Each structure stands twice: as structure tokens, then as C-alpha cells.
Image (tube, rainbow, N blue to C red):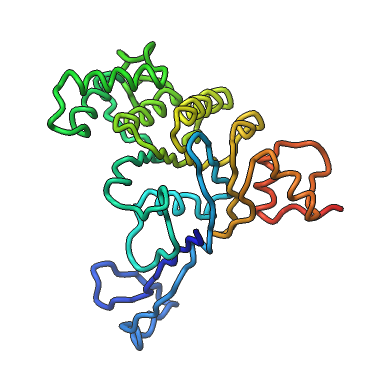
Amino acid sequence: MDVAYRLKIEAKQKSGGSIKRLFTPHESPPSDHGSRAAVPQERIILKGVTGIAHPGEILAVLGPSGSGKSTLLNALAGRLHGNGLTGTILANSSKLNKSVLRRTGFVTQDDILYPHLTVRETLVFCAMLRLPRVLPRATKVAAAESAIAELGLRKCEHTIIGNSFIRGVSGGERKRVSIAHEMLVDPSLLILDEPTSGLDSTAAHRLVMTLGSLAKKGKSVITSVHQPSSRVYQMFDKVLLLSEGQCLYFGKGSDAMRYFQSVGFAPSFPMNPADFLLDLANASVEGQM
């Protein structure tokens, strides 16, 4: 509730550093006077964001680049530390602690996977590292097999991950491997940072369908999405719209267009609700009564 994040930036110039700028004969070097004095600056990333994610639901965080989506997800996952973060973040009415964070899965935007391992080898290796030592090897392998089946990776389990230089699984399959990596610990909360980036509309739809099936098993799913298609948007139970760190809308995805129409903002022709919301967040839509 009322989550805010301020980032302090110190503009400090050091004289005599290892990096020097060469000046042309027509330029004069800047004065050294006052160069050692630090000028503290503050940038507000989040401004009092409030929302809630229930088990069995997908909460989509929408907004243009730089609106604070990734910062909010990092705050919810307990990855932000320091005095800059204010507000209250609760999990089942309790503050974030180690036991809660252990049941939280976080899928980053960039897939960090070893390209030469197959899908099955990757997940078995991750299971060996992430699951408790007291568990036998057979139990850990069974957890990896369960994740493969749950994420629909059977047909590519013996294909290497690959990268931009090595041919491997597709982009959608690679993202599902990253999600399976987090599903090994059976998280109650799954947070994803723009999992559909770089995927075509069909692959993005299949991925969100997978997230929907995970949510129906009693998990809370929070994901940021850059530019979802209309059929992907229809799968979101709740939507949180951010603009420059401020919350413009939080509620059911199906009620968003009706709400903005009630306050004087409506598209002049039928369009993808996600596109309209992003236009609003970018302040490029004029109100129409």
C-alpha cells in the first residue's frame, strides 16, 4: 500500500581522475571551483502505488517505458533495499520475510540460461542447486520432470537452450524454461518482468495461457507487459496502469475502458484496450464526452 521509491543521485565531479577530456584550441577547460562539492539530487520513481493481487488471478502492470514497472516488481519481490523505499508491502497480512521471499518466484526480462544445456539438463541442474540438500536426488529430478510437464516443454526437453549464435529452442520455449526454473520451488507468488517481450502475438498468447493455468492452481501471478494484444489483454483479471510512477488505474481489466469513459476519456473508434491505456499513460489522448 502507498508504495513509493526515491532514488538519490549525487552529482559529484572528481578532479584528477583517470578519464580526461581533450579540449580543442577554441575551448577552455571548465573551472575547478566548487567541483568537489556534491550536489545531491533526488528522482522519484514510484509515487504512492496501491494495489492487491489475489491467489488465482493475473495482475498485469501496464505503462510506457520508464513508468516504474520494473521498479515496482523489484519492490514486491523484496529486491529493493535502503531508505528510498517507503510504504507497506504485505503478503497474507504479514511483512516480507525470508519465508515469504522463499515462496516468491521472480522471472527477469532477460533469460539467463546456459546455451549448451538441453531443457531437461537445465532444469535438473537448477533443481540440484535450488532445492534443499536433505531431499534425495530422485525427488529433485522428479521436481524437474513435473516442471517440464507443467510448462508444456516435453517436445523440446532434449533440445539445447541456444542463444543468438547457437540454434536452440524458440523464444517462447526459452521463456517457459525460465518460468519452470522458478516453479521448481513451488512459489505462491510468481512475478514476471515483461515475459512477452520479443515474442510474436501467438507465442505471447500461449505464454499468458500458461500463466493463467498456473494462477488457477492457487498462485498469484503479477506480470508487467509492454504492449499486449487484445486477446492477451482479455486474459488479465486485474490491471495496474502506471504513468511516471503514478497509478492511473487499478481494477478489473474488463472495467478499465468503462471507467475512463466515465471520466471523459474514450477512443474515437474501437481499438485494443491496452493500446488506449498506453496512449492515456503517454498523455496523447484527448478527452471526449
Q: Residue at x 41, y 66 (%)?
A: 7
Q: Residue at x 43, y 60 (%)?
A: 88
| Quadrant in the picture for residue 166 | top left
| Residue 80, horizontal then vertical, whole percent | 35, 57
| Residue 23, horizontal then vertical, whole percent | 38, 73
Q: Identify which residue, 289 or 138, lies in the foreground.
A: 138
Q: Identify which residue, 9 or 250, lies in the foreground.
A: 250
Tell me if residue 87 comes above or below residue 67 in the rendering: below
Q: Identify which residue, 271 or 148, lies in the foreground.
A: 148
Q: Residue furthest front?
A: 93
Horizontal side of residue 152 vs 82, given as left or right:
right
Tell me if residue 84 comes above or below residue 247 in the rendering: below
Q: Residue furthest right?
A: 289
Horizontal side of residue 254 vs 205, given as left or right:
right
Can residue 194 be seen? no
Can residue 47 be seen? yes
| Residue 46, horizontal then vertical, whole percent | 50, 61
Horizontal side of residue 73 vs 226, given as left or right:
left
Q: Residue furthest top?
A: 155
